[in-house]
Amino acid sequence: MNLLNVYNWAIRHLSKGTGYTCFFCETRIPALNNGLCAACLDDFPINRYACERCGISLPHTIHNIREISQTEILHKERPQTDRSYTKTSSTNASSTQSSWANSPETNDAQTNAPQIVAVRPKTYLCGNCITTPPAWHTLTALCQYEYPASNMIQALKYHAKFHNAKLLARMFIAELNSIPGLQIPQCILPVPLHPTRQRQRRFNQAIELARPIARALNIPLDINSCQRRADTPSQANLDQLTRLQNLQNAFILKRLPAYNHVAIFDDVVTTGSTVRSLCKLLHKAGVERVDVWCIARASRDYC
């Protein structure tokens, strides 16, 4: 055993019983910090670079601030070899000035230098959602369906590791708090399992994940309005067309929901077939806005 292994062992075991420890590596953390140390949290596949409507991961470069000088926006002294800029009016440019442009350090420099503006869209949409918007309004996912989140969800579903649900729910709540202008739904509707499947599993993982979230937001958790009447086969290894065919009339509403804004909750959204079917059902029942919340969003490669 080398010195590094001894050090790591000591950090893990000596920190037990003295404050909080990281859920994964068991190193000591000064506060709860959603259950993870800074290093493990940094490695967790948080879904920050994603389409707002469908949750599909987007290239990280889409969030980079593109700095354009005012002279270039007004087509003055524009480099002849640069064809990457698109036409932007001076009115739009002034409305997107970066916050640092008004700071004391930059005010003096602005008198003799071109004004710099930062072009950053308020929302990020993929091409598919621009041309063909999904049935729901927004999709919020904590993370991509990758390690270690995928292992945690599978352990919850198939081995009843309920401590995984508590950690993932806590992290989801923290992620919700980071969304500016978030509209809280009037209730959370977990995707129901067929009664036969739920008796076999003894629990519904979507309910176990959504319960602490509903409690933290102080909104109802509706587990009675919707029922799964078709015991569809496992969707895990099916393509999108087969999933859609399996979910034809798979859900029914036992009573009309008394809400205008509902968030459907599921552990994983893959092709979106399940939540799409529920969205259409809720819209027909008079629900005006339906959002989708999930712990993990599978990428298109996985779909």
Image: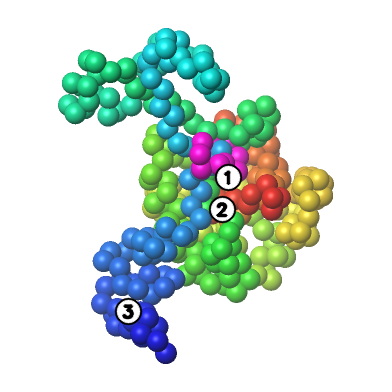
Q: Which residue is label 3 attached to?
A: 11
Nearer the observer, 80 or 254: 80
Give the alpha-carbon distance from disc 1 to disc 3, as whole Å: 35 Å
Where is residue 32 shown, x and y percent of the image?
32, 64
Q: Relative to residue 168, is residue 274 drawn left or right?
A: right
Where is 219 relative to 22, above or below?
Answer: above
Residue 198 in the magenta stretch? The answer is no
Residue 249 seen by the camera: yes
Residue found at x 58% / y 59%: 146
* Residue 269 at x, y percent in the picture: 63, 50
Q: Amino acid at mark 2?
A: Gln
**Magenta extent:** 52-62
Closer to the camera in the image, 245 or 49 = 49
Spot occupied by residue 2 in the image (x, y as percentages of width and height): 40, 87
At 32% across and 18% down in the image, what residue appears? 115
> Is residue 60 highlighted in magenta?
yes
Look at 44% across and 71% down and name the residue there.
24
Checking the image for residue 57, the label placed there is 1
Could you tell me the amino acid type at mark 1? Answer: Ser
Q: Main secondary structure of the magenta part?
A: loop
The image quadrant that residue 94 belongs to is: top left
Q: Secondary structure at mark 1?
A: loop
User: Are the residues tagged 2 and 3 within 8 Å (C-beta)?
Assistant: no
Read off the residue under disc 2.
Answer: 144
User: Is 1 situated above or below 24?
Assistant: below
**Is residue 147 toward the left or the right of residue 220 in the image?**
right
